[in-house]
Image (cartoon, rainbow, N blue to C red):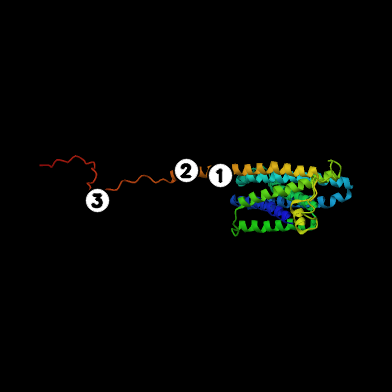
Amino acid sequence: MLATYLIGLREGLEAGLVVGILVAYLAKLGRRDLLGRLWLGIGLAIAVALGVGAILTWGPYAMTFQAQEILGGVLSIVAVAMVTWMTFWMGSHGASLSKELRSSVDAAIDRSWFALVVLGAISVGREGIETALFVWANAAGGSEPLLATLGAVLGILTAVVISWGISRGLVRFNLGRFFTWTGLFLIFVAAGVLAYGVGDLQEASVIPGWGTPAYSLVGIVPPGSWYGTVLAGIFNFTPEPTWAQVFAWVAYVAITVPLYLLMLRRRGRARAAAAAARAEAAPAAAAPEPAEPARAAGSPEPARATRPARADAN
């Protein structure tokens, strides 16, 4: 439940920031008459996300067991790919997000009335589909899918409240730090989803090795224990993974975590360089004009230019 709550909270905040930027920019332009088109696009995005969630939930029941496992494995891998891309994209484009969205609004206004609808649908629909797919993949591998779904809903509702508070100036916190740490957390959640997807493909005989565990941690983490349930619900932990699952988990973490940390380091250096450049430019721009040096007490006044004395008329 905690994993899906954070997924819903993070994706909801991303969508809330996007909506806030779009609405504020239209208001700044004095084009509140276009807000209806924007909300229409946002409504379509929410409907599509709910439709994707419904299809993922009830669609596979009409399929054979093997087809269900193949579909589950493939969609789990797709969900991992989308969340990984989202994490890196937000980390590298977060600072320029507002500028990019404003440019998109300008272009949409110049094209046609439907372009703004499409902009709203795409801007919010991406987060909605990512949320539906990743929550489904995480809930499918856990023992309590209802709690996982409830966690995602609570996360989204929390994001709505926080986004409203930010827009009203009632809530202030470091969004950059929030996205940074939740991005790192989601990498480990995604690793568990990837391992679960590999297990589905093994059950469907697409990948060999199902039924042969690489090791067993049942004695340390019993499946029915409360901490085993928590680990399974958050990270899709299994005490007896196959070799393919272990390899997939280790390879994903070993590649993704260093790249993510490298991206954070580069972003930190870029911000430090930008701050240093602003600090150097500020004194030059704010430097006052040199004042006339003060005259010491008792010193003669500086010589002044005088006109030649006029001769007195006799």
Q: What residue type is labelled 2?
A: Glu
Q: Residue at x 72, y 58 (%)?
A: 154
Q: How far apart are marks 1 and 2 (CA)?
A: 14 Å
Residue drawn at the location 46% of the way across and 45% of the way down: 282
> Which amino acid is tagged 3?
Ala
**N-terminal-most mark, 2 or 3:** 2
Are discs 1 and 2 less than 8 Å apart at CB?
A: no
Q: Can residue 68 be seen in this view?
A: yes
Q: Position of residue 232 (x, y in %)?
A: 77, 53
109 with respect to 55 (left or right): left
Q: How crowded is mark 2: few (under 14 residues within 10 Å), some or many (20 or more)?
A: few
- Tell me: 225 left or right of 278: right
Q: State the SS at label 3.
A: loop
**Residue 271: assigned label:** 1
Front position among marks 3 and 1: 1
Helix, strand or loop at label 2? It is helix
Q: Mark 3 points at which residue?
A: 297
- Answer left or right for 1 relative to 287: right
Q: Residue 15 carries which label?
A: none
Looking at the rendered structure, which numbered label has been put on residue 280?
2
